[in-house]
Image (spheres, grey):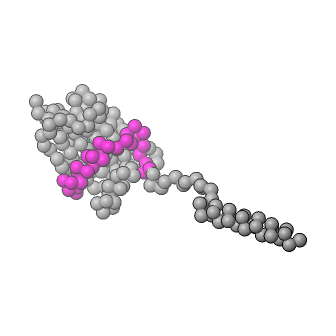
Amino acid sequence: MSLIRLAYASEATFDAQPVEKGVEPHVARILLTSRNNNAKAKLVGGLYYGNDRFFQYLEGEEEEVRKTFDRIKRDDRHRNIITLIEEPIEARTFSNWSMKYVPLSADVRKFLERHGLDRFNPQAFSAEQCEEMIELIRDSNHDQKLVNHDEAVTAPASKPSGFSPALKFGLIAAAVCLVGALIYAGSLL
Ligand code: FAD
């Protein structure tokens, strides 16, 4: 029994619906089937979908990974499938995830910015970018929400915090001066 990991990139063939409508229905169906099948085949991994591109990462028994990838390659919902990584591993690293899903999100945008990329194009990823993307999927906590919109690009406006310390000091000093002036004026009468 030998374990392998496999990552590939591909292009979606369907027209994506507007992101504000939520998870792309094609992707939702793919996830449903993947989670079902991968759990039975003891495969783990993650799927990223954005800019009409897929990046998928799978870990498991070599035979099961290859059988699944053969099915995936025949799927007409995507094309131009490029294998990015295919190599033996010691142990699975995506424990508990038959297929973790990450939508286009703030952390992926940051990843693109860091690498000077204007769009998500995993077919052109370097080995280092692949590894970073795998880490990002592994560490992401977006899946539970299953949202498909860009979050947190703008942070919520912070609540007004009242007077600044400098302003407070200035007001207190002004009040002390005013009281002093009133006392002095009173003493002159
Ligand atoms: P089926 O009984 O053949 O189909 C399951 C469901 O998918 C059905 O509702 C069917 O209508 C729908 N479906 C199947 N093919 C199409 C199609 N071409 N167009 C529209 N709907 C379709 N499968 C996995 O098992 N594991 C994975 O990790 C995985 N990842 C995928 C990643 C991507 C990017 C894509 C495009 C597909 C992926 N798939 C994955 C799906 C895979 O390609 C096969 O469709 C699936 O494995 C077939 O499994 P099945 O025989 O159990 O399902």
**Residue 32 visible within the image:** yes
Say which quarter of the image contains residue 164. Answer: bottom right
Say which quarter of the image contains residue 31. Answer: top left
**Numbered marks: total:** 0
- Where does residue 150 sit, x and y in percent of width and height? 42, 51
Left or right position of 83 against 188: left
Left or right position of 24 against 161: left
**150 in the magenta segment:** yes
Q: Residue at x 31, y 38 (%)?
A: 100
| 166 or 41, nearer to the observer | 166
| 180 or 116, nearer to the observer | 180
Bounds of the magenta segment? 123-151
Farthest residue, direction bottom: 188
Q: Residue at x 26, y 46 (%)?
A: 134
Placement of the N terminus among the 4 image quadrants: top left
**Residue 76 visible within the image:** no
